[in-house]
Image (cartoon, helix red, strand yellow):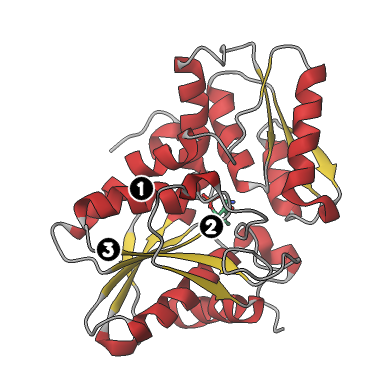
Amino acid sequence: MIYHSIDQLIGHTPLLDLPIDVPNSSRILAKLEMQNPGGSVKDRLGLEIIEEGIRQGRIIANHTHIIEPTAGNTGIGIALAAQKYHLPVTFVVPDKFSPEKQAIMKALGATIINTPSDAGMKGAAVKAKALAKQTPAAYVPMQFTNPVNPLTYERTLGPEIIADLAGQELTAFVAGAGTGGTFAGTARALRAAYPDLQAIAVEPEGSILNGGPAHQHRTEGIGVEMIPPFFKGLKINQVQTIADHDAFRQVRRAAAELGLLIGSSSGAALQASLNVARILPKHSTIVTIFPDGSDRYLGEGIYDKD
Ligand code: PMP
């Protein structure tokens, strides 16, 4: 097949049955989202946010200035889609986030403004809104509250997984939560097809879903400072809180044993899936998401020992 534009390469990622020992003779199937053209699950959202904005008349090609607070991957997705419609983009990024992601966003044409990491994503959001007030024809998609975020995954990732399974049973869905869009949208689509599905959210230590106090963590892309609005009305069977050292141990192990180059949120998802397999019935099928790859974290020493 010959493709004609980058956005045609988004989605339809492989679902890999991980060749590892899983407790209770269960299996873990991982959706390899690093295979999207911008390298993450958030390419799907970038395209939808821009095209939905155009459909709603909020974005005009060649004209509207997109401003968004982002940890990086959503920025890369938006920057890719913005190129197609010739839209200027500015991203507000807390300075702790991976320099590789920021370099990729710049290469795609975006302007980056850094905010202090201590102010978290909340600080980046406040700055983005202030910038938008001073910028003519600005539009802030605001991935943290925009319903297009979970809808993207309900329309694309969930149905792809259902098609990949081709009628086979599914016991549990395990995925990390940053904005919560990937988890909420995919869980909604999967539960419509599998009403008894266990939906298990993953967060790093330092995130508040299981009630712990908020603090910094090394696992990048997941973790929340408040309960995502997308979780309203969604049944979450369990939240797995994964320590950084466990997430990074799985990252190293995936490379060394499986030849899989995954980022730390994928490492956390793998550790959580293994934990869940221990408490689920024998021969369960667990689907998880590997949101991005390790290449954009090499400068942070993702493969270094703790
Ligand atoms: N992992 C990585 C690497 C990410 O960049 C993101 C997006 N922040 C996520 C997981 C979580 O996705 P979501 O925002 O949809 O919860």
Q: Is residue 262 above or below residue 66?
A: below
Where is residue 120 drawn, in percent x and y?
Answer: 77, 52
Q: Quadrant of residue 166?
A: bottom left
How much space separates mark 2 and mark 1, taking CA atoms?
A: 15 Å
* Residue found at x 56% / y 73%: 241
How much space separates mark 3 and mark 2, taking CA atoms?
A: 18 Å
Residue at numbered disc 3? 197
Residue at numbered disc 2? 177
Label 1 or label 3, whichever comes before in sequence order = 1
* Residue found at x 22% / y 57%: 195
Q: Amino acid at mark 1?
A: Leu
Which of the pair 145/108 is nearer the observer?
145
Where is residue 129 drawn, in percent x and y?
Answer: 75, 29
Label 1's element? helix
Q: How packed is label 3: few (under 14 Cα within 10 Å), some, or many (20 or more)?
A: many
State the residue lying farthest toward the left.
167
User: Left of 119 or right of it: where is 300?
Assistant: left
Q: Considering the image in quadrants, where does the C terminus appear? A: bottom right
Q: Is residue 26 above or below residue 149?
A: below
Where is residue 149 drawn, in percent x and y?
Answer: 49, 39
Q: Nearer the viewer, mark 2 or mark 1?
A: 2
Q: Is residue 67 above or below residue 300?
A: above
Is residue 10 visible in the rendered image? The answer is no
* Residue at disc 1, CB closer than 8 Å to ligand 1: no
Residue at numbered disc 1? 157
